[in-house]
Image: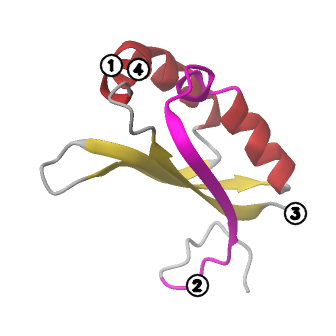
Amino acid sequence: MLKQFIVYRTDRTDGKAEEIRKTTRPLHAEYMKQFHEKVHFGGPMQNKDGVSIGGMMVIDAHDEAEVWEMINNDPFEKAELSSKIEVYQFRWQTKRPATLPPL
């Protein structure tokens, strides 16, 4: 049975994140296409000036190991964009999609 996970990542803070994101975004976008059915939503987190500072997504996976495999093969992470990545199992309750099994 698939479970939902939140992936929460923050960018590195040494001034290189913007350039890494700019050069690897096309590869990241292409990579993520294969997970279209698994990703409920996701996108960049932004500071008050609208500058990307990380990312977040909610995805379906069988277990946390599957999530980490997806993360570790992402071009963003191969380019070392993130300073920190956290993965949490998530129990979707409010506005739960009808496609998910009942609680």
Asked if the residue at tag 4 contacts the one at tag 1, i.e. Cβ–Cβ closer than 8 Å, the answer is yes
Q: Quadrant of residue 13?
A: top left
Gap between marks 1 and 2 measured at Cα: 37 Å
Gap between marks 3 and 2 measured at Cα: 17 Å
Q: Please give the residue where the numbered disc 4 appears in the rendered image.
A: 20
Mark 3 vs mark 4: give the one in front: 4
Stretch of the chain drawn in magenta: 73-94
The residue lying at 46 percent from left, 25 percent from top is 29
Tell me the number on the disc at residue 19: 1
Crowd around label 3: few <14 · some 14–19 · many ≥20 (10 Å): few
- Give the SS element for disc 4: helix
Left or right: 47 with respect to 80? left
The first of marks 3 and 2 along the sequence is 3
The residue lying at 65 percent from left, 47 percent from top is 38
Give percent across and percent down for residue 78: 62, 21
The first of marks 4 and 2 along the sequence is 4
Q: Report the front residue among 45 and 80.
A: 80
Q: Is residue 17 above or below residue 20?
A: below
Q: Is residue 91 above or below residue 15?
A: below
Gap between marks 1 and 4 measured at Cα: 4 Å
Q: Please give the residue where the numbered disc 2 appears in the rendered image.
A: 93
